[in-house]
Each structure stands twice: as C-alpha cells, then as structure tokens.
Image (spheres, grey):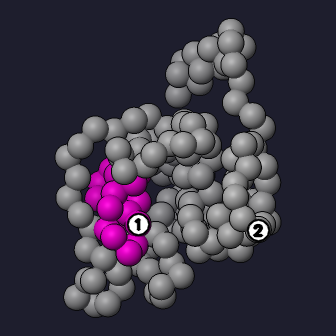
Amino acid sequence: MSADGSGAVPVPYDGPFRTVPCAEAFTAAECVRLRQGLLPQSMDDKWAVRFEEPFLYLHRSWTGLLCYRLRLDGSAGGGRIGEALASSHVQMVHGPDYEGALVSFLLRGTMLRQAVSFPVPASGVPGPEGLYQHAVSGTAFPETALPAPRRGLGAALVRAWRRLTR
C-alpha cells in the first residue's frame, strides 16, 4: 500500500513488452486529464495510472504490476497514442486486438469518464453479464461484444495497413 493509502506502489518493470494496437486521438483538454494520471480511491478502483513524459503507465492498483506503457504524443491541438505496449504480466488470452480495445476503454471510460462501451471478447467470458468487466475495470458500463479476429490474408492486410498508417 502506498504511503497515502491510495493503492499499491508501482512495481519496477524491465521485462519484455508486446505491441498492442491502439490508435486513440485526444483533444488538448483530454491530454491534460490523461497526464494527471489516476489514483485509486477505493478497493473497486482496479487501475492506477501515472504519467512520466512521454509515457502513461497503467498499473493494477492492488498489486502495482505494470500492465501497459503508452506513449502519448502531443501537440498544441491535442495528442494521440503513438505506441502502446503490454508487459509480460498481460496474458493476451483474447489477442492483441482485444487488448487494444481494452486500453482504449481504460483511457476513455475509466480515465476520461466518457460514455463508452466495455469491450467483451468475441469468444465470450464465463459468469454473468458484468462480472468480467467488474473484475477487469471495476466499472459497470454497457458491454459490446467485439467481432472475432480476422484470419488469413485479409487479417494480414489489415495489420500491414495499421502499421503503415501509425
């Protein structure tokens, strides 16, 4: 627990990262709010976010484990996620596209408090509706099932296009 009782102290991490697709863009005001980070206020708050130029670090609040490192590229008019990486603590059971959708939700829904849907993996999750969301994010937003991942040549072309347009 941190000295102020707001959650676990972030655990240093120097392990490997994996790329997560996340192409979110933000207004200047949203960038200011993201840079302020997020301190958990109760046990239901699952995330702690800190900003150290130019990165947003998303940690699990109870353990302090780093899950995501996002580079926030900014300009006078706003900013965007220039690079999104997941640490080895993130299992990626549902694939990198799902992790990218989850990161987008954490930024928009949890940090910016925008009315967005929580992404549910196409493969589904066990338990009643809302249980998985609460375990992952501590929130109760409407849920949207993501489409199944594309396979074959079409998926390869989509991945190539995403890399080229970043």
* Mark number displayed over residue 60: 1
Check if residue 62 falls in the magenta segment. Answer: yes
Up/down of 17 relative to 1, above or below:
above
Residue appearing at x 49%, y 72% in the figure: 46
Amino acid type at mark 1: Arg
- Residue 140: image location, x then y, percent: 71, 74
- Kindly tell me whether residue 156 is visible in this rendering: yes
Nearer the observer: mark 2 or 1; the answer is: 2
Check if residue 116 falls in the magenta segment. Answer: no
Location of residue 162 (image quadrant): top right
User: Depth check: 10 or 53 in front?
Assistant: 10
For mark 1, does the 10 Å Cα neighbourhood hold few (<14), some (14 to 19), or many (20 or more) residues?
Answer: many
46 sits to left or right of 6: right
Up/down of 103 relative to 43, above or below:
above
Q: Circle 1 — which element?
A: strand
- Measure the alpha-carbon separation of dots 2 and 1: 23 Å
Residue appearing at x 78%, y 60% in the figure: 143
- Residue 4: image location, x then y, percent: 28, 90
Amino acid type at mark 2: Pro
- Kindly tell me whether residue 113 is visible in this rendering: no
Of marks 2 and 1, which one's residue comes earlier in the chain?
1
For this orientation, the residue located farthest to the top is: 153
Residue that carries the numbered disc 2 in the rendered image: 128
Residue appearing at x 48%, y 85% in the figure: 43
* Quarter placement of the N terminus: bottom left
Q: What stretch is highlighted in magenta?
A: 49-68
